[in-house]
Image (cartoon, helix red, strand yellow):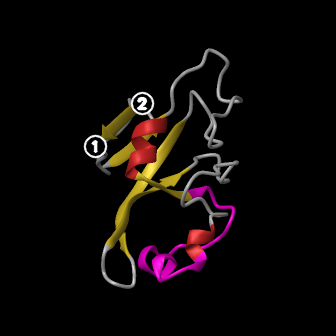
């Protein structure tokens, strides 16, 4: 399965960004879903692992972004194998996902399918 999420269209193309730095009129890949727990084993957050197909994080600056100090506390980084790199991969809470994306597409892919 290939799962993508789209940000709302704004009429100006994907050169415009929203308040948390996501490009508008743009699709992002959903590559994982995680639950992270604090030291007392209490659920801290449910996170989507997202990827910008442009291959860079762009300027996503919301909660759990690569620049968020939360990654330096607890064991959150090891729970999701987080690394701070400009590879297009970032994490966001389920609540932020519902706020900033307005479309989800689930596509089935099979290796034997051929384009004709």
- Label 1, residues with CA under 10 Å away: few <14, some 14-19, many ≥20: few
Q: Position of residue 32 (x, y in %)?
A: 39, 60
Residue 114 inside the magenta-drawn segment: no
Can you tell which mark lies on residue 52? none
Residue 83 inside the magenta-drawn segment: yes
SS for dot 2: loop
What range is drawn magenta here? 72-89
- Label 2, residues with CA under 10 Å away: few <14, some 14-19, many ≥20: few
Left or right: 64 as drawn, with respect to 106: right
Q: Is residue 15 depicted above or below 49 in this figure? A: above
The residue most toward the top is: 11
Give the labeled residue for mark 1: 108
Q: Position of residue 94 (x, y in %)?
A: 38, 50
Nearer the observer, disc 1 or disc 2?
Answer: 2
- Tell me the chief SS of the magenta region: loop
Left or right: 106 as drawn, with respect to 100: left
Specify which label sits upstream in the sequence, 1 or 2.
2
Q: Residue at x 47, y 83 (%)?
A: 75
Q: Residue at x 54, y 21 (%)?
A: 9
SS for dot 1: loop
Q: Position of residue 53 (x, y in %)?
A: 58, 47
- Distance (Cα) linking label 1 and label 2: 20 Å
Q: Examine the image and state in which quarter residue 23 appears.
A: top right
Give the labeled residue for mark 2: 102
């Amino acid at each position: 399965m290939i799962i993508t999420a789209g940000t709302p269209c704004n009429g100006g193309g994907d050169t415009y960004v929203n308040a948390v730095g996501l490009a508008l009129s743009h699709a992002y890949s959903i590559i994982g879903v995680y639950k992270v727990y604090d030291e007392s084993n209490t659920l801290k957050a449910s996170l989507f692992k997202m990827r910008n197909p442009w291959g860079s994080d762009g300027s996503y600056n919301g909660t759990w972004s690569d620049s968020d100090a939360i990654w330096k506390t607890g064991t959150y980084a090891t729970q999701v194998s987080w690394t701070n790199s400009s590879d297009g991969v970032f994490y966001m809470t389920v609540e932020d996902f519902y706020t900033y994306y307005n479309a989800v597409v689930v596509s089935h892919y099979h290796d034997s399918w051929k384009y004709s």
